Structures are given as structure tokens and as C-alpha cells.
Image (spheres, rainbow, N blue to C red):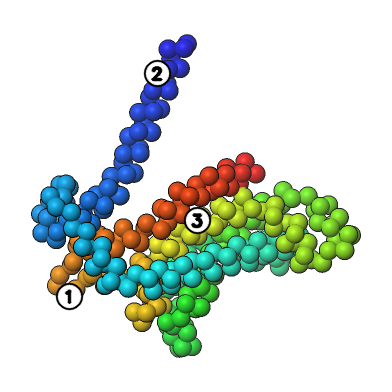
Amino acid sequence: MHVKRQLGSAAKFVVLAILLVLFLIPFLLLLLNSLKENAMITSNPLALPTSFQFANYSNAFKQMNYLDAFTNTIIITAFSVILIGICGAMTAHYFVRNPSRLNQNTFLFMVASMIIPFQAIMIPLVKIYGSLDMLNSKTSLIFMYLGFGSSLAVFIYHGFIKSIPKELEEAAMIDGCSRIRMFFQIVFPVLVPTTVTIGILNVLWIWNDFLLPSLILVEPGQRTLPLSTFSFYGTYTVDYGPLMASLMLTILPVVIVYLFAQKYIIQGVMQGSVK
């Protein structure tokens, strides 16, 4: 029995090690190719670099206007995620505590909207926003992310809020809390694990999104990090070395944040899954 348990543990370790290597291979290939010359990247992308081209990173930093693109990405991601979290929680709370036919149908329409692919509505959406002169604006982009991200947030919050005892809110109201104060001091703190889960999903989506910003943000000064990597594509050529370096610079902030906050992220996801 003890031998079988040891063999089972060893098999799990081997499987996890193989999965770890498979997940790390794309990242390592990107890192290695970001330190090569263009000719070596195209001739043998799997080979180790013979000389390290750190100039690729300085060229990428200048050409993609990294600081401006980083600032734009931080602003858009932060405001979008905060608004999706607050508005999603408030909407779900209203639906749960006011189960009228209208609210139930509205909730069903919001959930059903998640199956509509963005590509099906992107042309009419851009045309309408263009006619209203609302393109090339970070505010418009944040507003769109709020619309596209609210359905999933409301759906997840809706299931969680149903497990919160209504008597807890009624006791706070009897003690003199207004509805807004009761929500932010009683309900919203209980939703922290769910909020962490929703925040992670939306940060990964919005930070790496290319399609929607490419339709909305036209001027170079408004570009996000994924959009800035497109500046290395010429009409007939591609500058692969700085392009690989720019991709590394784009994903590096998310990796650093995850390394420092992984304890709280995993804790939030685990609490959310248990609830």
C-alpha cells in the first residue's frame, strides 16, 4: 500500500513537471529570441543565442514609446477592472434582492449576451462611436470594457450574493445604515474572494487585448502596450529582435505583479471556489 502511494506521488510529480515544461517553453523561446539578431531568429529560432543582443531591449523601449504605452495600459486596465467590479456587484445585488419579473428577464438577457462574439458587433459599434465622435478616447474604451465585462461579473456575483443571509443586511438597515452604506460596509467586504477572481480574469483580458484598442485608439500617443508592438511591422519587413523584446516588456509587468501577489491571488481564488 505504501509502495503504491509512493508510485502515485511520483507519477503526479512527473506529470506536473512535464506540464510545467510545456507551459514554460513558449516563454523561454520568446526570451531567447529577444536576445538574438534578426538573421538568427529567422534561420534557427530554436537555437541558443551566440551573442546577446541587449540592444534589442533599448531599441524596443524607444520605438514603442514604452512609458506612454505603459501609462495608457495601466489607466485603462485599472479603471475598467474597478468599474466592472463595483457596477457588477451592485447590479447583481439589486437583481438578487429585488426578484421581479423585469429584473429576472434583464438578468437572463445579460447572461445570454455572453455568447455573442465581439467580432459580430465590432463594425456597427465602431461606426456608431465614430458618428458620435467618441473614438480615440481612453474613456470610450473603458466604457466599452465595462459593457463587455459586466455580464460575466454580474453572473458570478449573482450566484455568490444568494448565499449571503438577508437578515445580515436587514440588521444593518435597522441600525441606521443607508442602502449605499450597507452595501459597501456589509455586502462588498463579503464579496472580496469573488472580486479577486473577477479582477484577475479581467486584468488578464484587458491588459493583453489587441483588437478593441486597435479599433478605438487611433493616435500613436493613445496606444496601449499590445498596440505598440505593432510598430515593428513594416510594409515588407519585420524587425524580429526588437519585436520579441517588446513582447517581453509587455508581459513582464503582469508576471512581476503575479510573483508579488500570488499568495493573495491564490487565496482569493480558493475562497471563491469553496464559496
Q: Is residue 219 above or below residue 212?
A: below
- Residue 233 placement (x, y as % from top left): 22, 70
Relative horizontal placement of residue 1, taking residue 58 as reference (left or right): right
Q: Residues within 10 Å of mark 3 (few under 14, many from 20)?
A: some
Between residue 30 and residue 201, name the one nearer to us: 30
Q: How much space separates mark 1 and mark 3, taking CA atoms?
A: 35 Å
Circles 3, 2 touching at the beta carbon (< 8 Å): no
Q: Is residue 111 visible?
A: no
Residue at (51% x, 73% y) in the render: 142
Residue at mark 2:
7
Residue at mark 1 to residue at mark 2: CA–CA distance? 57 Å
- Residue projecting furthest to the right: 174
Q: Tag 2: Cα neighbours inside 10 Å, few (<14), some, or many (≥20)?
A: few
Q: Which amino acid does the dot numbered 2 rest on? A: Leu
Sequence-first tag of 1 and 3 = 3
For residue 68, which quarter of the picture?
bottom left
User: On screen, 202 above or below 137?
Assistant: above
In percent of width and height, residue 138 lies at 47, 77
Residue wearing tag 3: 201
Place of residue 25 in the rendered image (x, y in percent of width and height, measured from the top left)? 28, 45
Q: Secondary structure at mark 2?
A: helix
Q: Residue at the spot x=81%, y=52% of the render? A: 168
Q: Amino acid at mark 1?
A: Thr
Q: Nearer the viewer, residue 181 or 115?
A: 181
**Which amino acid, by three-letter code, is at mark 3?**
Leu
Q: Assess whether mark 3 and mark 1 are in contact (beta carbons under 8 angstroms).
A: no
Question: Which labelled disc corresponds to residue 133?
Answer: none
For marks 3 and 2, the one nearer the N-term is 2
Residue at disc 3, secondary structure = helix
- The disc placed on residue 235 is 1
Badge 1 marks a residue whose secondary structure is loop
